[in-house]
């Protein structure tokens, strides 16, 4: 029995793989194995012999079984170790070079505009891009039959009243945020709302999605003079010059009375767009004194309060400031264009440090 023990323990410890180990198991403790057949021969022994040999054979069987299990574990650990060595990965490889991305000119201008109006005491308000036709039109004094609804080339998400849902549109301007802000804040108030707006239109200066900043100031002593001063201050700060020429044109919007549109002097010669020179004018905003009906729709008493409002095209002033002659380039996602016109992600525009460095 001692020989059997020595033989199998040494064979097991020398086994190089799991197949050899399995063969050894069968040979020793399998049904017809050497140790098993010894156990079967116990029946032929005398009771005295059996009493000695029985426990010894059982102990031997246990010992061989645990040696097999331990060796099996050791072999699989070694195999895993081997695999890990082969699959080794150097995570310290250098990352991709710096400045892979940049800030889009529209985001940059958005931040610049916010910075300038924040300095004049305006806070930033928000509203949904899918808007009910009440906020987008009716509350702004544009009733159902009004031609302005057709002029705006509206995208309807849901037009009819047939299933109790009120009609909804992709907002055609940021003006509905005027109403939402009056409802939420009341008077006095001073807000701007930069955001996306949508109209079915497409050419060199129009895209189906574009950006506006709405402005609204309501107080007990607000006049057209305040509006003009604010806009002139804004334009000087934004273009970082003292002599940008503005043209205030009498106009009409249902939500303001009186109303004015503002154009900026520019030139388009040779595919180059330049601000402050030339004989062309680019319309950049609509403005006016808030119509009493609009104040009323926002829950503000027009006998006590007045307000001025404006709606400014972010993309338009971005084109002018950064010399981009075609609006559509902003949304083409051309990497070469983005690398050329993009801004460093770490340079936040500030009035002190410079807006557009
Ligand atoms: N909502 C107008 C548009 O998209 C722009 C506008 C004009 C906004 C006059 C105003 C305003 O707040 O007073 O064409």
Image (spheres, helix red, strand yellow):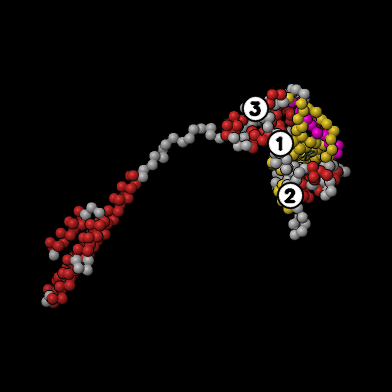
Residue stretch in magenta: 257-266
Are the residues flagged by discs 2 and 1 in contact, CB closer than 8 Å? Answer: no
Near mark 1 (Cα within 10 A), the count class, few <14, some 14-19 or many ≥20, is few
Q: Give the quadrant of residue 357.
A: top right
CA distance separating discs 3 and 2 = 41 Å
Residue carrying label 3: 354
Read off the residue under disc 2: 156
Q: Say if mark 3 contacts mark 2, CB within 8 Å.
A: no
Identify the disc placed on residue 177.
Answer: none
As drawn, 95 above or below 20:
above
Residue mark closest to the camera, 3 vs 2: 2
Please state the quadrant of the image where ligand 1 appears: top right
Coordinates of residue 54 in the picture (x, y in percent) = 17, 71
For the point 18% across and 57% down, the residue is 11
Cα separation, mark 2 vs mark 1, equals 21 Å
Q: Earlier in the sequence, mark 2 or mark 1?
A: 2
For the residues labelled 3 and 1, the Cα–Cα distance comes to 33 Å
Instruction: Bin the neighbour count of mark 3 within 10 Å (Cα to Cα): few under 14, some 14-19, many 20 and up.
Output: few
Question: What residue is pinned by disc 1?
Answer: 203
* Left or right, 189 with reference to 87: right
Q: Please identify the residue farthest to the right as the structure is shown.
A: 303
Q: Name the spot of residue 104 as percent of width and height, x first.
A: 62, 35
């Amino acid at each position: 029995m001692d020989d059997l023990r020595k033989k199998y323990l040494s064979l097991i410890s020398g086994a190089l793989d799991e197949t050899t180990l399995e063969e050894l198991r069968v040979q020793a403790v399998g049904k017809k194995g050497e140790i098993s057949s010894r156990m079967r021969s116990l029946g032929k022994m005398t009771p005295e012999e059996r009493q000695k040999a029985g426990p010894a054979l059982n102990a031997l069987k246990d010992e061989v079984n645990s040696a097999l299990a331990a060796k099996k574990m050791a072999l699989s650990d070694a195999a895993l170790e081997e695999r890990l060595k082969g699959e080794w990965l150097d995570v310290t490889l250098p990352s991709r070079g710096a400045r892979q991305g940049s800030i889009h000119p529209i985001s940059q201008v958005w931040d610049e505009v916010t910075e300038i109006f924040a300095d004049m005491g305006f806070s930033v308000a928000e509203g949904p891009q899918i808007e009910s036709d009440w906020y987008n039109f009716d509350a702004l004094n544009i009733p159902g039959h009004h031609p302005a609804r057709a002029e705006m080339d509206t995208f309807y998400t849901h037009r009819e009243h047939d299933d109790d849902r009120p009609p909804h549109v992709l907002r055609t301007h940021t003006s509905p945020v005027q109403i939402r802000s009056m409802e939420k804040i009341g008077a006095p108030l001073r807000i701007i709302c930069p955001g996306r707006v949508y109209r079915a239109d497409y050419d060199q200066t129009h895209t189906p999605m574009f950006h506006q900043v709405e402005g609204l100031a309501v107080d007990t002593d607000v006049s057209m003079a305040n509006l003009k001063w604010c806009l002139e201050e804004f334009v000087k700060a934004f273009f970082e010059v003292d002599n940008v020429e503005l043209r205030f044109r009498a106009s009409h919007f249902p939500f303001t009375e009186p109303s004015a549109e503002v154009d900026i002097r520019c030139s388009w010669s040779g595919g180059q767009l330049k601000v402050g020179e030339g004989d062309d004018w680019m319309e950049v905003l609509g403005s006016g004194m808030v119509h009493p009906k609009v104040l009323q729709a926002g829950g503000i008493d027009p006998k006590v309060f007045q307000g001025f409002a404006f709606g400014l095209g972010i993309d338009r002033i971005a084109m002018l400031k950064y010399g981009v002659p075609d609006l559509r380039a902003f949304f083409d996602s051309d990497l070469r264009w983005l690398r050329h016109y993009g801004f460093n992600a770490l340079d936040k525009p500030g009035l002190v440090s410079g807006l557009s460095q």
